[in-house]
Image (tube, rainbow, N blue to C red):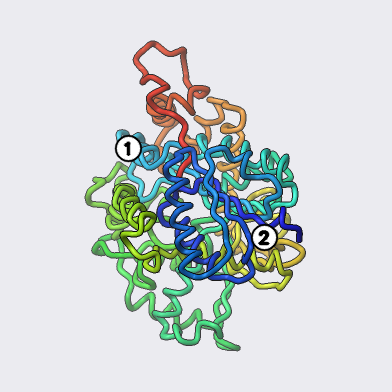
Amino acid sequence: MSTADRSVVLVGAGSTVFTPGLMADLVGNRTFEGWTVHLVDLNAEAAEVMARVGRRLAQARGVDVTFVPHTDRREALPGARIVTTTIAVGAAEGWRLDLEVPGAYGIAQTVGDSVGPGGVLRALRHVPELVAIARDVADLAPGAQLVNYSNPLTANVRGVTAETGVPTIGLCHGTMHTLAKLNADLGLADRASEVHATFAGLNHLCWLLDYRLGTEDLYPRLAALVAERAGGRDAPTSGEEGVHLPVSADLFGTFGRYPAPGDRHVAEFFGWYLRSTDGAGVDEDHLPWGLQQGRDDTLRYIDQKSDLWQRLHDQADGRVPVGEARRDQEAERLVSIAEALVTGREHVELAVNVPNRGAITNLPPDAVVEVPAVVGARGVVPLAVGALPTAIAAVLTARAQQQELTVRAALRGDRDLAVQALALDPLVPSPEVARAILDDAVRAHPGTLASFAGRPATGTAADPAATPVRTENA
């Protein structure tokens, strides 16, 4: 590999959790000795602060890894081997609006960044920007592997793979965390390397198809523990911890397989967990099925950005040791994948998001699915898992088709398709509400969603200059 190819580009380097973890893991892996990490963010200060933190990490480890800040991705991309995207168009405030705009119509969401009306609105903003990034990658770094973390992961990867030939995968830590929690609940944390697990589905609704310790089928033990510990609709609010989760337990009882990655994500795929028993809306401050903490955690994460940035400034300026830099398990996975691609030493990933192309035989071939994969000299090769149980395939097929509409709407700026995508979401009660949500979102994001307006601007919308497109942390 030439020195020109020894570079990693991170677009959206202002990610306060992911970027420090990525930098720490890169400098801790000797495979990347002599490499350059290009940190791209439209916020020049964010890129510079991250570069300074990276330099301090490299110096503390005595490693030759160079960190360079950029505001122009085309300046950073030439010859890159790995390109990673962690962008958030609209930044944290945009995410908050993805919750608040549907909330005005009685629609409660626990996360709102992947599915639900919030996931559709986020896709309308993100898909065009990620496709533009991928086209720059194709132009300037044709040998690169693109790894996307930005949500909605499925729609974003589908947009890129539909419109460009850039090798692209999506990564999410959720399935891995679910497996770790299940292993711990079954008393297998110390034997995790002996456990075989196969998950398959869509991002944020992935199903445990096979679960074994050697020749022992672990599903009977899992079923008994879920029956013993899990609550129901009136379960008290609690954290995302293993087999007691009431929504996951209910889905297990209904569909016969355990879902990942936790209740606050999987609940949004269905029309019944975030509604009252009479089908009406629910109180956003008192969600059923123990889901309130999931929503509260999302809002807390959105609010914590300023505190995290202060700590990063302190690390960049030397007031806090870089040895205390935040680490992120997801970044560790990226470095392992990059190492396998660079060295050719194969390793198996539990879950990557890739075009289906037969990996799951009863889902659409072009859908982006989450399946295990082998990573090595041949790139990222998904492993075939066969057919999903029929009912699960029906749920996921409907969602994949809705996401296909969303991607087409985003790429064409097509209002009719956007309304259809919103109306097909199980959390949206009618086409009338779908149109109202879209109109409110256009007013909230005039700089990015103007093409979806139902009529010419009347002067009541916010000044587009007041809501710039921001490519920041996911």
Q: Secondary structure at mark 1?
A: helix
Disc sitting over residue 360 in the figure: 2
Q: Residue 432, relative to residue 265: is it above or below?
A: above
Front in this rendered view, residue 263 or 257: 263
- Residue 68 coordinates in the image, percent (x, y): 55, 49
Q: Is residue 41 left or right of residue 110?
A: right
Disc sitting over residue 100 in the figure: 1
Q: Can residue 341 be seen at all in this image of the molecule?
A: yes
> Quarter of the image containing the N terminus?
bottom right
Mark 2 neighbour class, 10 Å CA radius: few under 14, some 14 to 19, many 20 or more = many
Q: Residue 307, relative to residue 100: is it above or below?
A: below
Mark 1 neighbour class, 10 Å CA radius: few under 14, some 14 to 19, many 20 or more = some
Residue located 74% across and 51% down the image = 143
Could you give the CA–CA distance between mark 1 and mark 2, rounded to whole angstroms? 35 Å
- Sequence-earlier tag: 1 or 2: 1
Front in this rendered view, residue 95 or 307: 307
Q: Amino acid at mark 2?
A: Ile
Locate residue 379: give its quadrant: bottom right
| Front: mark 1 or 2 | 1
Q: Residue 329, relative to residue 203: is it above or below?
A: below
Residue located 41% across and 80% down the image = 184
Q: Amino acid at mark 1?
A: Glu
- Residue 17 coordinates in the image, percent (x, y): 41, 57
Residue located 49% across and 58% down the image = 55
Locate residue 261: give its quadrant: bottom left
- Residue 50 coordinates in the image, percent (x, y): 45, 52
Locate residue 358: give its quadrant: bottom right
Residue located 58% across and 70% down the image = 29
